[in-house]
Amino acid sequence: LEVASRVLRECVDANRQDVEAIELVKAKVFGHGPVAGGSGPRTGRKRKKHSQLAVPGRSAEATRMQSRVQVVEHKHSVDVTISMSETLRALLKSNRVRFPSKSLLLKANHAAVEKLRTLWLRHGHVGEHPPVDVAFHEALFCLLLRYRLTAGHGYHAALPAAVFAALQKDFGVTCECFASPLNCFFDRYCSAHADVDAAFGSVGSFFEFWPVRGSFEVNPPFVESVMVCAVDHCEALLRRTESGRSLGRAKTSAALPSEHAGQPLSFVFVMPGWSESAAFKRLGSSPFNRGEVLIAAADHGFVDGCSHQRRDRHRASPYDTLVVVLQNKAAAAAESPLAVSGAKLDRLRAAFAHGIPTLAE
């Protein structure tokens, strides 16, 4: 786990100053908490600009600062911008943070923004008054900025919707262990940036997640040390449900209560077909391996990591993909609805073909 944490930190070291800028922007522009507000009038038919109105109970200065986040709708995309005053630019400059222009422009397509709005409302923001546009735009801005500044889009590719549907139907999967609000299929998932993702349904890092039952999809970033740590964590959780013993860590220092021991627990693990990698070998020899399928690169694709900015959603896979089902005895039992079968693996393989980009893409 320490290795995984170090690798993830190294992934953002080159952008660390920009990542820190998010906290500066949040503190300077947004204050110290979510603020209820209203949406301004929409003007024009082809372009819609949402400006924030004055909020009762807030100072004039806070309202002026609040209004710097603007959302502009175009025909095929949505612009999320923040105008930078000289004061704010001086603050960022004093912290050695540079942005290329007087306003920071972030983009997403309409489908992505509506999905994020749905997640945001679903997770605790329903019924706020006045209308919630101001607070949502804050959360949207911070989310898009974080994922723009941390790592590349290749780290955020996701399984096609048809694959998730097959996993849900045949293996009971209801949660993702490595996802983001931008690419998640389910509305509960683990992610790398809980501070900005939690508002959209994230339960935090997979390495701080301790399920005792259920079925999960595991598609970690294709970084060897992270994949190995993910295998370690899956096996430790499975071993715990069978032995009832603790994992020897602070958060799980006590043995499982008797009512939790022996509950069905399943992980569908997805990684590149790198046969020489340690993670590949570990999965192949795992005592919890109940079935696997290797899919040729030409026979499948993924949801692109930047699909929230593009009209073409899918990308071809550059590698073969290995899918391994890790289960404890309860999940693998013949009478269990989670149990692996040849027919289920065949359906899963076929579902991956839905990710192959079409000629239009």
Image (cartoon, rainbow, N blue to C red):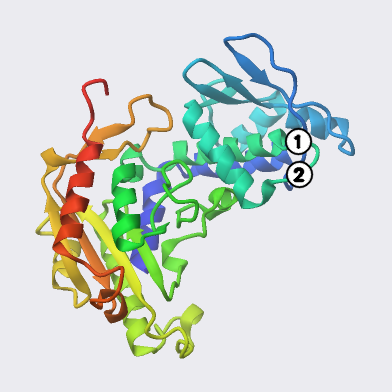
Image coordinates for residue 175, horizontal then vertical, percent: 42, 58
Image coordinates for residue 319, horizontal then vertical, percent: 15, 44
Q: Is residue 5 above or below residue 96?
A: below
Q: Say the numbered circle drawn on residue 151.
A: none
Q: Which residue is drawn at the image coordinates 75% and 31% (left, top)? A: 65
Image coordinates for residue 287, horizontal then vertical, percent: 19, 78
Q: Amino acid at mark 1?
A: Pro
For label 1, the SS is: loop
Q: Is residue 83 above or below residue 233?
A: above
Q: Pointers 2 and 1 in contact (CB under 8 A)?
A: yes
Q: Which residue is drawn at the image coordinates 31% and 65% (left, top)? A: 267
Q: Is residue 308 above or below residue 155?
A: above
Q: Amino acid at mark 2?
A: Glu
Q: Is residue 358 above or below residue 96?
A: above
Q: Pointer 2: what residue?
A: 128
Q: Which of the two residues, 140 or 169, is positioned nearer the viewer here?
A: 169
Please identify the quadrant where the N terminus is shown.
bottom left
- Residue 292 lies left or right of residue 91; in this view the side is left
- Residue 109 lies left or right of residue 54; in this view the side is left
Q: Which residue is drawn at the image coordinates 38% and 55% (left, top)? A: 178
| Spatial CA span between label 2 and label 1 | 6 Å
Q: Pointer 1: what residue?
A: 131
Image coordinates for residue 5, horizontal then vertical, percent: 40, 61
Q: Which of the two residues, 342 or 206, is positioned nearer the viewer here?
A: 342
Q: Which of the two residues, 245 or 345, is positioned nearer the viewer here?
A: 345
Residue 54, picture quadrant:
top right
Please identify the quadrant where the C terminus is shown.
top left
